[in-house]
Amino acid sequence: MELVTRFTVGLALALAAGTVALAAEPPHEQAHAAHHGEPYPGPHRYERVAEPKGWNQRPAGADIAGYRHNFQAPRTFRIGVYRRPAGWHAHRWAYGEILPRPYWAAPYIIADYWLFSLEVPPVGYEWVRDDSDALLVSVQTGEIVQVVYGVFG
């Protein structure tokens, strides 16, 4: 009889604990959010990200000699497929070289450079994408003054 009483008490405690656990369980939406994270408040899918304050306050009369570096990017960004201008082949650019004019076309200009951790270009310079690299180029001469290798994956 004592064994039956222990079993009954144990069963009653287990059922009570299960009832408490069910009562404490959050609704489905809360459980889903807790497991998968909260909705991100920022842009979704392909919405354009707002420019940061002062993004286009380019330094005038900057010391271009200070830009002359070839860097390895600390972070890689995955964006769309890259297609080089027709008739051109792969080349690993370095500062001091002249970038051919076909690369200065709109599909290659990186207008939203801040999204890729690139610094604000000085007046008269633009960031240009060539495959996985970002090149800081003079829009008058085409001279490359800085290269950041591996920005795009």
Image: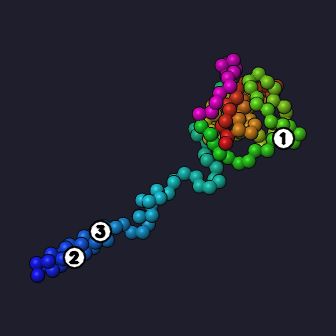
Q: Quadrant of residue 141?
A: top right
Left or right side of 153 for 108: right
Left or right side of 48 for 103: right
Q: Between marks 2 and 1, how big is the CA–CA gap?
A: 75 Å
The residue positioned 45% from the left and 64% from the top of the image is 32
Quarter of the C terminus within the rendering? top right
Amino acid found under the numbered disc labelled 3: Ala
* Residue picked out by circle 1: 85
* Residue picked out by circle 2: 11
Q: Quadrant of residue 66?
A: top right
Disc 1 vs disc 3: which is toward the camera?
3
Say which element carries label 3: helix
Q: Which residues are magenta?
A: 63-74
Q: Is residue 40 above or below residue 10?
A: above
The residue positioned 75% from the left and 44% from the top of the image is 82
Disc 2 vs disc 1: which is toward the camera?
2
Amino acid found under the numbered disc labelled 2: Leu
Disc 2 vs disc 3: which is toward the camera?
2
Which comes before the other along the chain, label 1 or label 3? 3
Q: Position of residue 35 (x, y in %)?
A: 44, 59
Which comes before the other along the chain, label 2 or label 3? 2
Q: Quadrant of residue 103?
A: top right
